[in-house]
Amino acid sequence: MAVNGVVLSVDLGGTKVEAALVDAEGAVLARTRRRAATGSGAGTAELRSAVQSVVTGALEAQPPGCMVEAVGIGSAGPLGTVADTVFPLNLSVRDFPIVSVVREIVGEALPVSVGLDGLCIALAESRFGAAAGVSASVSMVVSTGIGGGIIINGVPLLGEHGNAGHIGQLRVSTEESLESATVGTLESIASGPASVAWAQRQGWTGRTGEELGGYARSGDKVARAAIERSAKAVGQALAGVCALLDVGLIVIGGGFSQVSDDYVELVEACARRAAVLPAARTMKVVRAALGSDAPLVGASLLPIWASVRVQAGVAGATRR
């Protein structure tokens, strides 16, 4: 029997952690996907248990003829201040030792790579999705939070600490607050919860992003204004990103990007209007192609890029 190599992929987010086996073609193997809740109130012990539960479950579902060759871990950011840890801002834990937690299940023999979830999505969309065949692209998620990943000349941009791509922390407002540095950031204005909160301040009585979309489709002007406000902020940020990086393709996914059928088109129009440079006015904004599989598929590509960078002697490779 031929043995097919697969990667154990893990995706740690603010509301859930998932694990699955992913093959070389970017396919999540049937019946290997496992999910457990996380949440901002989860402590280190609860998070450790959740991660180990999904990893164990995915491995137990390993089909005959498959061999796990590596582990890729994508996480909400930033990466931790201690090597092989993560510091998700939407969780209550700090410097969570995710690599050692996973290694308690998989052992020491397998290579383990860690990267931001935004980077994983960018890798997946660049290899198998909406940005396939494009040398330079930015992929971003508009959801509970806003994050992203950057591909330049076919290569993922990691940055000095592996934290490149935090587009949600770009400031798109001059408003400042002594209480919080996040006031005026793209995430604080354009994310799903931020848009719902803005609409509520205008008198809207709904509670969720899904309701916001439904009200807007029914003609509610406040709900529609909240959606347009989000798209405008994202577009303004992208105009700057495209000027800085000379990127012509933006891929947008995430739950709140589904709030209206024309959300991506609104973003593109706003970005082009806000662009200063002629090239940035021709940017294309498209919907992500891989949906909820993208973080796991992208995590499966992290070991490949870690190996490439190590072989090339590049410092700051995706941490292993």
Image (spheres, rainbow, N blue to C red):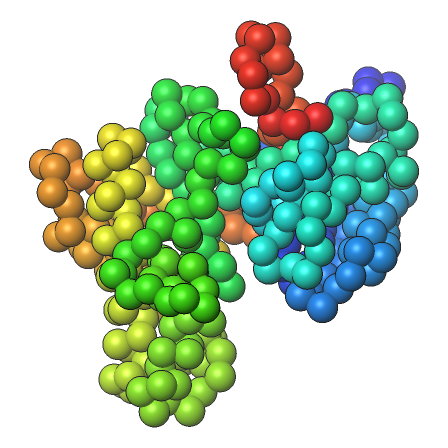
- Tell me if residue 1 comes above or below residue 233 in the rendering: above
Identify the residue at image location x=64%, y=48%.
Answer: 87
The image quadrant of residue 258 is: bottom left
- Tell me if residue 68 comes above or below residue 259 in the rendering: above
Q: Residue 98, how many percent across, how many down? A: 75, 42
Q: Quadrant of the N terminus?
A: top right
- Tell me if residue 315 comes above or below residue 169 in the rendering: above
Q: In which quarter of the image is the C terminus?
A: top right
Left or right: residue 256 compared with residue 34: left
Q: Which of 171 and 262 is in front in this view?
A: 171
Left or right: residue 76 compared with residue 101: left
Identify the residue at image location x=37%, y=21%.
Answer: 153
Residue with the most extreme front position: 178
Is residue 74 visible in the rendered image? The answer is no
Q: Residue 141, how many percent across, how many down? A: 45, 52
Q: Which of 288 and 85 is in front in this view?
A: 85
- Tell me if residue 259 comes above or below residue 114 in the rendering: below
Identify the residue at image location x=25%, y=84%.
Answer: 221
Left or right: residue 128 compared with residue 238: right
Is residue 156 visible in the rendered image? The answer is yes
Q: Nearer the viewer, residue 61 or 231?
A: 231
Q: Residue 236, how many percent across, how many down? A: 23, 53
Left or right: residue 47 compared with residue 198: right
Identify the residue at image location x=11%, y=42%.
Answer: 276
The image quadrant of residue 110 is: top right
Q: Which of 304 and 93 is in front in this view?
A: 93
